[in-house]
Image (spheres, rainbow, N blue to C red):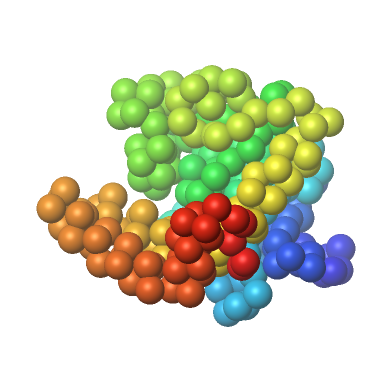
Amino acid sequence: MSSDQDLVLAQTDARGVVTLTLNRPSAFNALSEAMLAALQQALERVAADPQARVVVLAGAGKAFCAGHDLKEMRAEPSLAYYQRLFGQCAQVMLAIQKLPVPVIARVHGIATAAGCQLVAMCDLAVASSDSRFAVSGINVGLFCSTPSVALSRNLSRKAAFEMLVTGDFVGAEEARAKGLVNRVAAPEQLDAEVERLVASIVAKPQAAIATGKGLFYRQLEKGIAGAYDDAGQAMACNMMEPSALEGVQAFIDKRKPNW
């Protein structure tokens, strides 16, 4: 377990489930430069850990994440600084997608601006029923352009654009209906709902999950013919994995696979 002074707390259980907790509760876990650097390092450690199976991304205190640290941003009004900051944030977001294991956002309280972007970039999301989501930069004159990249790849175009141009909050159930989160649970059941999703994932072969996640995001950026070419190759390689051969044989034999 990390110390309380760490900006990102990391804990790994016996199954290889890594919980990363954003730890700036007094600032609603705003993504300062230091926080982004700590999260990048934590994700790199997961990427290098062959025993890791799932990441749960959570927030300490009353909120998941309130986005960028506006006080820090306002303190250095230079184009070079802002370019560097948003580039750093983009690298963190891409690191989540590049991980070979699924990343689940465990959302409570608010997830706003880059915090909402963080939810959208996670592979899966489970939200407390009292959580709220917004890309609210427009309310201070700043269109959430970088969050729009993640949002437009999760929601329909019109739903994403409405959130971006209004800055209005949406509740957990509406976020689920729009495609931003997978599951909604009562606050006291949030951890249990996250665990149900985690348990389902860790029960599956690690190699198949890694292959599937990589292919899933690659094919989204391709034309349909290229996507099918890539998917076919990925599936053929996956079929050569011992876990897949065992799984298919177990199905034929009408027994549980021995993974």
Q: Residue at x 45, y 25 (%)?
A: 178
Which residue occupies the foreground of this view, 14 or 119? 14
Image quarter of the N terminus: bottom right
Measured as percent of width and height from the top left, residue 259 is found at: 61, 67
Q: Residue at x 75, y 35 (%)?
A: 190
Q: State whether residue 79 is above or below residue 105.
A: below
Q: Residue at x 49, y 34 (%)?
A: 180
- Report if residue 99 is visible in the image: no
Which residue occupies the foreground of this view, 133 or 167? 133
Measured as percent of width and height from the top left, residue 153 is found at: 36, 41
Q: State whether residue 137 is above or below residue 78.
A: above
Q: Which residue appears farthest toward the left when viewing the image?
A: 225
Measured as percent of width and height from the top left, residue 110 is found at: 66, 33
Q: Is residue 152 left or right of residue 57?
A: left
- Report if residue 225 is visible in the image: yes
Q: Residue at x 25, y 67 (%)?
A: 233
